[in-house]
Image (tube, rainbow, N blue to C red):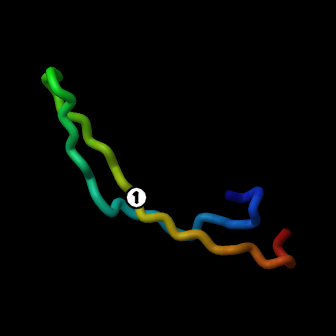
Amino acid sequence: MENKNYILKSAKVNFVVYWLKEGAEKEIQIVLPELHFEKKSDQNC
């Protein structure tokens, strides 16, 4: 996103999904983050 003049300001785990593929023995944790970006001002470019 930096090439579009956005910078990451904060991130947090919003949800954790537990997924079990059919026939698999172990489930997989999938982390779904909440990301907040801020547009860079022209002065910072």
Query: The N terminus is located in which quarter?
Result: bottom right
Q: Return the residue at label 1.
A: 33
The residue under the point 77% across, 56% down is 3
The residue under the point 42% across, 64% down is 34
Rate crowding at label 1 as few (under 14), some (14 to 19) or many (20 or more) other CA atoms within 10 Å.
few
From the top left corner, tell me how far across and down residue 14 is, in percent.
33, 63
Query: The C terminus is located in which quarter?
Result: bottom right
Horizontal side, residue 38 vs residue 32: left or right: right
Among the 4 quarters of the image, the one containing residue 5: bottom right
From the top left corner, tell me how far across and down residue 25 is, in percent.
13, 23
Among the 4 quarters of the image, the one containing residue 15: bottom left
From the top left corner, tell me how far across and down residue 28 is, in percent.
25, 35
Among the 4 quarters of the image, the one containing residue 20: top left
- Depth check, front residue: 35 or 24: 24
- Depth check, front residue: 8 or 32: 32
Question: What is the number of callouts on the image?
Answer: 1
The residue under the point 40% across, 58% down is 33
| Residue at the front extreme, as displayed | 22
25 above or below 3? above
42 above or below 1? below
Secondary structure under tag 1 reads: strand
18 above or below 14? above
Residue type at mark 1: give it: Pro
From the top left corner, tell me how far across and down residue 4 is, in percent.
75, 62
Horizontal side, residue 5 vs residue 37: left or right: right
